[in-house]
Amino acid sequence: MNKNFLALGLAAALLAPQVAGAEGFAINEWSAEGVAMGGARMFAEDDAANVAYNPASITKVKGEVMKSSYTYLSPHGSYKADIKESLKPGTNETIPAYPEYGHNKVHAGWAVGSYYVRQINDKEWFGIGAFPRFAMVSEFERASKASTNAFFSKLNGVSVTPTYAHKFDKKWSAAVGAEINYVGLELQKNSYDPRVQMNVGATQTEGGSYALGWNAAANYAFDDKNEIGVVYRSRITHSLEADFKMYPVIGDKITADAYGVVTLPDSWDIGYNHKFDKKTRLELKATRTNWSTYDALNISLSNPSVPGVLPSNVDSAKNWESGWRYAIGLEHNLSDKYTVMAGFAFDESSIPYNGGDFMVPTGLRRTYSIGARYNDKKQTVAVALGWMDVGNLDFAGHATDAYKSAHAYDSFTKIASISYQRKF
């Protein structure tokens, strides 16, 4: 029964659509308990989702445990774009610069996690998880000027992380694991030609890639009440092979082979756990993500179906900056069976003025969350609700965009999560 449970959970994690839940396109919503505590959940007892939050803490799991988690995320937001001065088609009449107002189409999605942990003996543990570390989706009106930058963008991702952990003594534990990471990327936009100052067609780029990474973690307990931990996740470089299609305003569809390199950033998690007593504990967590690896999104085109029409490269500078995410989580046991949780997280914005776009139009973020859990000797059920207040973001247009600059505002994400865990 446990093998079927794990297979079903892994399949759900691989097939479910996902949307962004943190600064950039990182995902931190790996379990309902993690959502409830703002992502500050590195030291949980008997929780299979430790595979995702802190692999060194799977040494806190007793016996054999499986868990599945489903997190619903619904992003909302508006924008103002300052449209460039242009010529009315077929005339010499000038259309003055003007503001365009719009909003994203709501594309709610699911972040799904599946986890399995088995205690081998008093010193060794094995764990495996399937969960999204990077994902996003955004969509805007196809007839808008914003669509010359992007009207549909989607990155689906999932990581499978087999992990080995060792408990050296009462104070030290450590873990090391591999990461098999998949990303599927789809980009759609209207192609704006600044020479004729008009849209000349729509383009679609779609492809996927598998790549390998690794992670390592360590915990140290000062005493029964205080513990620290650190987790490192390596950067992962994807060589994406994709299909490129262009649908010109005049003429037939044009196809080409597309190729690009996307480097997902490495990161450090540093956490502190304090137990006030047997019922209440507090976690603090800081995450440093090296978003500076996302310096450009350059796509090379080859073998076009109509030679001489398409450019050989479609380049877009990003130049993101590395940044921090801070979280605090509180967990209180009302009884042996019922627990309540609360959390808060703050994400710095990593997107510079000259590197922003409508693919990921988000600024700094503040997330407020609460949750509750029921557990008995064999199973655990947890639920959580969160509200992510997404800050404003100003960014510049480029030569191939119909706008000079844009301002994203009134952005937020609604979050709801449920987890189920069973011991065998």
Image: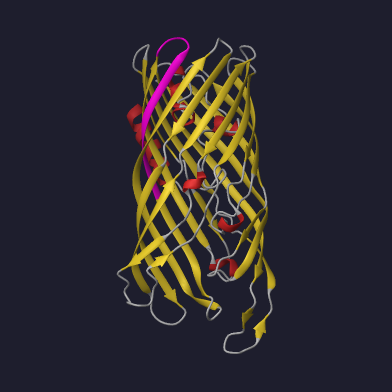
Between 243 and 339, the one nearer to me in the picture = 243
Q: Quadrant of the N terminus?
A: top left
State whether residue 424 is above or below residue 87.
Answer: above
Quarter of the image where the C terminus is located: top left
The one nearer the camera, 280 or 81, is 81
What's the image's color scheme?
secondary structure
Which quarter of the picture shows residue 41? top right
Question: Residue 240 location, x and y as percent?
Answer: 36, 54
Whether residue 422 appears in magenta in the rendering, the answer is no
Which secondary structure is most common in the magenta stretch? strand
Q: Which residues are magenta?
A: 168-183
Residue at (44, 28) in percent of width and height: 51
Question: Eyeballing the image, is 250 above or below 287?
Answer: below
Q: Position of residue 81 (x, y in %)?
A: 65, 65
Extreme residue in the left direction: 303
Horizontal side, residue 412 vs residue 168: left or right: right
Q: Is residue 393 visible?
A: yes
Determine if the magenta segment contains residue 173: yes
Residue at 51% x, 61% y is: 152
What is the x, y in percent for residue 227? Answer: 55, 17
Say if 104 sits above or below 89 in the image.
Answer: above
Residue 413 percent coordinates (x, y): 62, 46
Q: How many marks?
A: 0
Q: Is residue 1 visible?
A: no
Q: Residue lying farthest bottom?
A: 91
